[in-house]
């Protein structure tokens, strides 16, 4: 059944997040030959419209207002509900990002619709789209179908392939004028805690450190390796609790859930709460002094050794490969 599907494009730090392209890929499956419409909300965001089209959107609608310069649930809800009211879509897709996790349940509540959050794959069975999502901290997967009504889903970054970018694709980028009523929360300033560089939740390569890193400076060789691999640095809660790094780097049950192509765990024991955030990574390399460490049970490659010797050696070898 051909459907009209909206995809919210997420702009952060002056670029569209990759997960927006992955959400378009998911939406084009759900559209089944129908129309995929990108939605951009913010201030001066229309310049990103063509990129959404190049990644597979058929057209793009923008809602621009200075009150939407910073994300607020209130402002974005008003903007998106106006687009939904105009377009009457049969599907809505967001990235499963901090923004998506905040906005999607709110919109679903307003629409009195269901929501399938944190989708990692979409399949087809018996003429139905099957949405697959992890449950019990990634220990099992459940399959969901939408029997009837709106298909509303958030897509976990790094799991669904985006469509290939096609620079020759063209489509309409139109603006919808929405009167944004006074916001209940006004963001005066944003102070970033996280480091610059690759965004942890979308990184293809993550080098993560645990309590075995032993100090803030102990993260230096990990930063170096991540830089050479074009990846991001993450951490266990053990490392965060010990004040070796910021909590924004924490991966796990109470931190970020990540699914990079390559996860290198350095001095991390592999507690169940840590595994909950990274065990679905495509390739896991563990470096640990203790051959009995639990992390080796989920690792594809294990190196028993001192991370302060192994990590610099890896960095040197990867540098040679890049030359
Ligand atoms: P440790 O368990 O102390 O492990 C350190 C490892 O480093 C050891 O295996 C050791 O052999 C190795 N090591 C030491 N020196 C070296 C060296 N020089 N070279 C190589 N290896 C070395 N944890 C998370 O990570 N994320 C979460 O989201 C999270 N949520 C939690 C939620 C709850 C409700 C609870 C109760 C706990 C949670 N935890 C979480 C904490 C979790 O249980 C563990 O305590 C934590 O993951 C341990 O961190 P770690 O592996 O860095 O430290």
Image: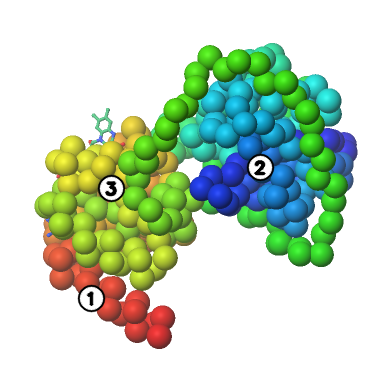
Q: Is residue 132 above or below residue 285?
A: above
Q: Measure how far apart labels 2 and 1 are at the Cα level.
A: 46 Å
Residue wearing tag 2 = 44
Residue wearing tag 1 = 313
Give x and y (percent) for residue 299. 33, 57
Q: Residue at x 27, y 78 (%)?
A: 316
- The answer to which of marks 2 and 1 sits earlier in the sequence is 2
Give x and y (percent) for residue 24. 70, 46
Residue 163: image quadrant is: bottom right
Residue wearing tag 3 = 235
Mark 1 closeness class: few <14, some 14–19, many ≥20 residues within 10 Å? some
Mark 3 closeness class: few <14, some 14–19, many ≥20 residues within 10 Å? many
Residue 198 appears in view? yes
Q: Secondary structure at mark 2?
A: loop
Residue 142: image quadrant is: top right
Q: Secondary structure at mark 3?
A: strand
The answer to whether 266 appears left or right of 232 in the picture is: left
């Amino acid at each position: 059944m051909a459907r009209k599907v909206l995809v919210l494009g997420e702009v952060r730090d002056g670029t569209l997040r990759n997960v927006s392209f992955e959400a378009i890929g998911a939406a084009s499956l759900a559209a089944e030959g129908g129309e995929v419409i990108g939605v951009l909300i913010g201030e001066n965001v229309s310049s990103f419209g063509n990129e959404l089209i190049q990644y597979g959107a058929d057209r793009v609608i923008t809602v621009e207002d200075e009150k939407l310069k910073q994300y607020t649930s209130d402002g974005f809800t008003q903007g998106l509900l106006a687009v939904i009211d105009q377009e009457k879509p049969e599907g809505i897709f967001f990235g499963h990002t901090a923004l998506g996790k905040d906005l999607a349940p709110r919109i679903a509540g307003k629409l009195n619709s269901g929501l399938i959050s944190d989708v990692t794959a979409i399949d087809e069975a018996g003429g139905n789209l099957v949405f697959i999502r992890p449950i019990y901290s990634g220990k099992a997967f459940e399959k969901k179908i939408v029997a009837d009504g709106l298909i509303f889903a958030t897509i976990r970054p790094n799991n669904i392939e985006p469509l290939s970018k096609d620079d020759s694709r063209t489509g309409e980028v139109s603006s919808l004028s929405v009167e944004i009523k006074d916001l209940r929360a006004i963001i005066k300033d944003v102070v970033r805690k996280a480091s610059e560089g690759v965004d942890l939740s979308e990184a293809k390569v993550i080098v993560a450190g645990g309590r075995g890193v032993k100090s803030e400076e102990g993260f230096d060789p990990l930063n170096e390796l991540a830089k050479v691999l074009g990846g991001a640095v993450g951490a266990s809660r053990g490392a965060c609790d010990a004040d070796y790094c910021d909590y924004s780097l924490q991966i796990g049950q109470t931190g970020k859930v990540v699914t990079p192509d390559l996860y290198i765990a350095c001095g991390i024991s592999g507690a169940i709460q840590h595994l909950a955030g990274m065990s679905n990574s495509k390739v896991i390399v563990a470096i640990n002094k203790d051959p009995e460490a639990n992390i080796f049970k989920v690792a594809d490659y294990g190196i028993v050794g001192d991370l302060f010797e192994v990590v610099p050696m890896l960095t040197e070898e990867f540098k040679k490969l890049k030359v």
